[in-house]
Amino acid sequence: MSAESLLHPARRSVTAQRLQGQLLVLAAAALWGATGTTQALAPAGAQPLAIGAVRLAIGGVTLLLLAATRGRLRERAGWPLLPTLVAAASMAAYQLCFFAGVARTGVAVGTMIAIGSAPVLAGALGVVLLRERPTPRWFVATLLAVGGCLLLGLATGGVRGEAVGMVLALGAGLAYALYAVVSKKLLARLHPDAVVGVVFVLGALLLAPLLFWVDLRWLLAPRGLAAALVLGLLSTALAYTLYARGLTQIPVADAVTLSLAEPLVAGLLGVLLLGERLTPLAWVGVGCLFLGLLWLTLGRRV
């Protein structure tokens, strides 16, 4: 710690708050990273689109009930209607675009495009809508992390040139970035518990018609129900609560870049729990991802 920081307790407090926000986002990304492993352990009849709609419904209802029991819905500031609807629509659109894009391009490429494009899009939206200015450190960290995602995607799935699928995956990245930016505006005046509760219930309602078109019989199996509860309660309700709390303490661009820990955790869990093997190129991607996240999180303190 420098002598200058010792003379400025307020600056130390801001630094500690920023680190706390970064750790909260990393914890959320770790929970998201377990999504793929949980889906792999679900019954064979569980379609990805059905899983997305069910997890959003379970997570949204849980979040809304928690917010209501804690009195978070009685906010004096009032609810900005348009940003709330945009955030809910963005979350619903992310589910649709992501799963549709992955179905056309393959899991590796679709995930790479969706997750890899989100930090860049969030940085641009943050400048336009929030007047946030990404730091040089963010640019370096994002370049390393996105490059790591690219290497992971190339190593695990190759490139399938399906133009519509790539556009859908890019739409998922845009939807996620827009959700993060609009949520940041909501969090400036409302409690995180209230924001995620209302936004996710509205998003679940937008996806509710899908439940009439997909096969839900897999929920009757113990493994199916367990997978749905884990995805809804942990990978959605808890993860997005942590993410919202972290988002109140750090810029949107930083938060979305740190959320790239998701493919890092997903890859490591695949190796440890599912017996998957990573190629040398994939391990280089893992290393780049890790370095990018480490640079953004700890770079100012080492």
Image (spheres, rainbow, N blue to C red):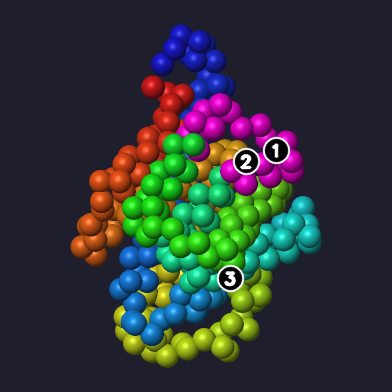
x and y, in percent, of residue 178 in the image: 66, 53
Q: Mark 2 points at which residue?
A: 123
Front-most of residues 137 and 168: 168
Question: What is the spatial separation of the Cα atoms under label 1 and label 3, in whole angstroms?
Answer: 27 Å
Name the kind of residue labelled 1 in the image.
Val
Above or below: residue 92 compared with residue 193: below
Q: Name the residue under label 1.
A: 127
x and y, in percent, of residue 220 in the image: 38, 89
Q: Locate the N terminus and report the quarter of the image it occupies.
A: top left
Q: In which quarter of the image is residue 251?
A: top right
Q: Earlier in the sequence, mark 1 or mark 3?
A: 3
Question: What is the spatial separation of the Cα atoms under label 1 and label 2, in whole angstroms?
Answer: 6 Å
Magenta segment range?
120-142
x and y, in percent, of residue 44 in the image: 34, 82
Q: Name the residue under label 3.
A: 96
Front-most of residues 264 and 201: 264
**Residue shown at 70% from the left, 38% from the top:** 127
